[in-house]
Amino acid sequence: MEGNLRVQLAGLTFSYPCMLASGVLGYSAETMQRVIEAGAGAVVSKSVGLKARDGYTNPTVFQAKNGLINAMGLPNPGIETYVKEIRHVKELICQPLIVSIFGYSAEDYAIVAEKAATAGADALELNVSCPHVKQTGAEIGQNPNVLSEVVKAVKAAVNIPVFVKLSPNVTDITLLANAAVNAGADALTAVNTLKAIAIDIETTKPVLSNIKGGLSGPAMKNIALRCVYDLKEKLPNTPIIGCGGVSNWQDAIEFFLAGANAIQIGTAIAYEGPEVFQTINLGIKKYLEKKQFRSIEEIVGLSHRR
Ligand code: RRO
């Protein structure tokens, strides 16, 4: 099917434009292999940090109307353990592996970045946008000066492309994007989950153990799409990876038209399984043929044309 579905971004080539979003099936090499076999052009790992974290106690996920609200709490085994998994993934798959990393300081990010790159990551995605874990995530990605410091430290530590995953929980996403790009980010992933809450009317209490979490899925699609549109308008030459509520090929096309060069899929996999990649690839291919476009590149940002 490949052909006109190939996309290039930040020096990497992806056979297919849809990647596995971080946090979904991104723990073990075998599940990542399954996702690649189902038609993903790349996989993004679950976010990994310097030290292991258990994450929050249950309940950590709530099924909302048209989406999920999660507060997993960054469970991860720590980079020293995870490097073995990175090496194993690289033995199993030949599509790009993007390792998502987080830290509590610029130095943390740089150390984890260097270890992930040495183990074989093809690119890094800096998670500076987790909406509900203190002292990391959005607390970094909502402050342009701190964000810039983190990106600069990582860029100095590695020679692979660095993507920055932005938060939608800001007044103007382009200010943060500018800071990331000026500090050397090679691409932007837009966006992480929207800060949200669910309340149980029987117990009268919030559902999630952490109280607040991040909303993903169809409920946030048009917000993520607007973020991509804003980024393309202000930073027309920066590659953008659209993420947020893509569940069918029509959604994917909307993201390309808004300005995304590639997209990520997360929550739709929880609903439909990895087969969703193949279905979306086929839909994109048919759309391009019907509209007589030769490549995805030809439609990136087309909605901005006046
Ligand atoms: O682990 C999580 O709770 C989590 C993370 Br790191 C993130 O970036 N976004 C999200 O919705 N959940």
Image (spheres, rainbow, N blue to C red):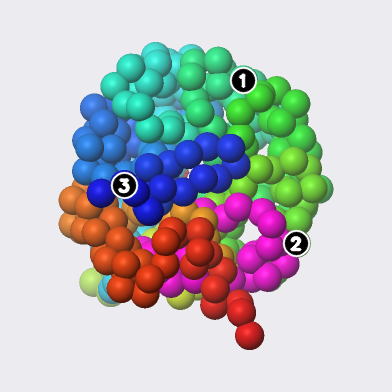
What is the number of the mark on residue 2?
3
Q: For ligand 1, tell me if the residue under mark 1 lies within 8 Å.
A: no
> Residue placed at 45% from the left, 17% from the top?
83
Residue 84 location (% of width, % of height) = 39, 14
**Left or right of residue 22, residue 28 in this image:** left
Q: Is residue 32 above or below residue 200?
A: above
What is the magenta range?
Answer: 229-257
256, 127: nearer the viewer: 256
> Residue placed at 26% from the left, 40% from the top?
35
| Residue occupied by mark 2 | 175
Q: Is residue 182 above or below residue 63?
A: above
3, 18: nearer the viewer: 3
| Residue occupied by mark 1 | 114
Report the quarter where the C terminus lies: bottom right
Visible in this render: residue 198? no
Residue 112 location (% of width, % of height) = 58, 24
Query: Would residue 240 be counted in the magenta stretch?
Result: yes
